[in-house]
Image: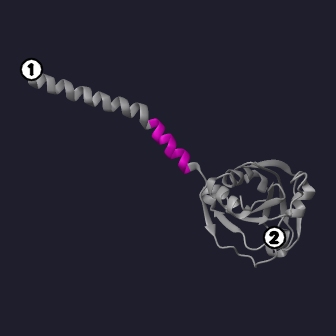
Amino acid sequence: MKKTLTIVLIAAAGALGIAGAAAVFAPSMFAREESRAAQPVWSEINWPFLTDQWGRGKAFACKAADCGTDIKLYLRAKIGFCNCTTGVADDDEVERLADFDLFGNRQTALAPGQPVDVHWMKGRSRPYAFTSPDWRGKSFLTIAFNDKCDAIVATAVVDRAQPAALESAILAFLNTERVLRWAQATLGL
């Protein structure tokens, strides 16, 4: 009888321990799963443009199910092309660095630019609408940032009229280790 009571008490204590651990750890496990599910999923896609003086870049896509709308993001380095003294400090520098030529060179700014940080680099972002017939109905966000005299230009193409609303998701991706490794390799850091 004593042996049976001891086994029952040990089993009950074990069950209570498991229930207590589940109460403590399960919410954080579910929160981690929810935060992982809430993160946009970026997939690398083929660079769709012809090679020019800046070479080929990297291209990524985020589907509407993950980002709220389809986003195509094109990254290119422009080695030695940034203002070495001031960096990407104003909208004129963003426009000088932007990859407008990839999209027909017909665009209009939707708003003034604003400062951004991508890892240790400083820069600016600015939203635009396409005015060329091939890109009608799409808009884009240009984000240019620099390391000394070298710049990286990110162009996010979206189906919305206000691409700036997606800036935080795009900047979050630009600040990932994946993009950091590419930037370091491309800039020779």
Which residue lies most toward the top here?
A: 2
- Per the model, the C-alpha gap separating discs 2 and 1 is 83 Å
Magenta stretch encompasses residue 31: yes
Using the image as rendered, state which of residue 87 and residue 46 is in the foreground: 87
Which residue lies most toward the right here?
A: 92
Residue 22 makes an appearance in the image: yes
Q: Are marks 2 and 1 in contact (CB under 8 Å)?
A: no
Please identify the dominant SS of the magenta region: helix
Quadrant in the rendering for residue 132: bottom right
Residue at the image point whose x is 67% and y is 55% from the top:
180
- Which three-letter amino acid code belongs to the residue tagged 1? Lys
Q: Please name the residue that numbered disc 1 is placed on.
A: 2
Q: Secondary structure at mark 2?
A: loop
- 153 sits left or right of 18 in the view: right
Quarter of the image with the C terminus is bottom right
Q: Position of residue 93 (x, y in %)?
A: 90, 58
In front: mark 2 or mark 1? 1
- 49 sits left or right of 30 in the view: right
Q: In this picture, which residue range is highlighted in magenta? A: 27-37
- Which three-letter amino acid code belongs to the residue tagged 2? Arg
Quarter of the image with the N terminus is top left
Mark 2 residue crowding within 10 angstroms, few (<14) / some (14–19) / many (20+):
few
Residue 136 circle label: 2
Q: Position of residue 134 (x, y in %)?
A: 80, 75
Using the image as rendered, state which of residue 164 and residue 6 is in the foreground: 6
Q: Secondary structure at mark 1?
A: helix
- 108 sits left or right of 35 in the view: right
Quadrant in the rendering for residue 73: bottom right
Residue at the image point whose x is 72% and y is 69% from the top:
57
